[in-house]
Image: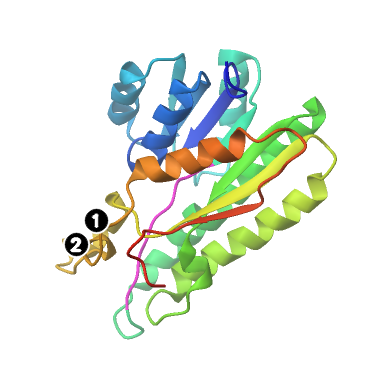
Amino acid sequence: MGVIAGKVAVITGASSGIGAAIARELSEAGAYLVLTARRQDRLEALAADLPGKTAVLSADITTPETPEKLLAFATTQFGRADILVNNAGILRVGPLDTFDLAHLSPMIATNYEAPVRTSYVFARAMKAAGSGSIVNISSIGAHLTAAGVGIYGGLKKALEMTSEALRIELAGSGVRVGLIAPGTTATEIFADMKSHGEPGWDEYITPLQPEDIARAVRYLLEQPERANIARMHVYAAADSH
């Protein structure tokens, strides 16, 4: 049995795309799962299709009380939380003249505040237990500067800085913090662009698939306790950035 077997993994944004792929990968590795997202029907359908023990909690991760509820739910269902994967995220882009500023607060809440709040809530419990792993899903957009994507990239960069600071603060505690920055991946994240008649970024090249990122998460988690992979970038082979 691998090192993930029997661990309790909590995954946000688990109803589709990368989150659902991570759920499948970790379930096949023997983990017990707590899956959360807003779409209850999607969560239940995924849970029914996974090989291992799985519990679902439909919730809005941007609600400040959700992280505490999620930790309490994991503890009630499985007795603890060993792994947290902060995957939930949204993408809104556009030029200065037409970008809808109504998107700003939801992006901050989903892409930065929610993963930071959840990381802190779970990190405190993991530190008290003396072990745990936190994986934050970032983006290569955190390291690209381009017109129209500054808000998304800036929030991902902020998440990376906070993740790195948390990793350093928890060094020696038994709690590891790492992040994975995917390149262009074929998921629903481009649905908003496509709904406005714009091509999604996954239409320009042969994109990564969610399973590629899920394997990277598993690789990070399977490292021995003495190792902490702090950052992993996964590019599409055709990506020229």
Are the residues at dot 2 and dot 1 in contact (C-beta closer than 8 Å)?
yes
Type of amino acid at the residue the image marks with label 2:
Lys
Q: 144 and 59: which one is in front?
A: 144
Element type where label 1 sits in the image? helix
Measured as percent of width and height from the top left, residue 14 is found at: 40, 36
Q: What whole-number distance in Å separates the C-alpha atoms at marks 2 and 1?
A: 5 Å
**Would you call the spot at circle 2 few (<14 residues within 10 Å), some (14-19), or many (20 or more)?**
few
**Residue position marked by numbered label 1 in the rendering:** 191
Type of amino acid at the residue the image marks with label 1:
Ala
Query: Where does the C terminus fall, quadrant-wise?
Result: bottom left
Which residue is pictured at 73% across the width and 41% down the height?
227
For the magenta stretch, what is the residue range?
86-94
Q: Say the numbered circle drawn on residue 194.
A: 2
Query: Where does the N terminus fall, quadrant-wise?
Result: top right
Visible residue check, residue 58: no
Query: Toward which corner of the image does residue 161 lie, by quadrant?
Result: bottom right
In the image, residue 31 sits, relative to residue 174, either above or below, namely above
In magenta segment, residue 179: no
Q: 201 and 205: which one is in front?
A: 205
**Would you call the spot at circle 1 few (<14 residues within 10 Å), some (14-19), or many (20 or more)?**
some
Query: Toward which corner of the image does residue 80 lie, by quadrant?
Result: top right
In the image, residue 167 sits, relative to residue 172, either above or below, namely below
Which residue is pictured at 51% across the width and 18% down the height?
30
Query: Toward which corner of the image does residue 47 lie, by quadrant?
Result: top left
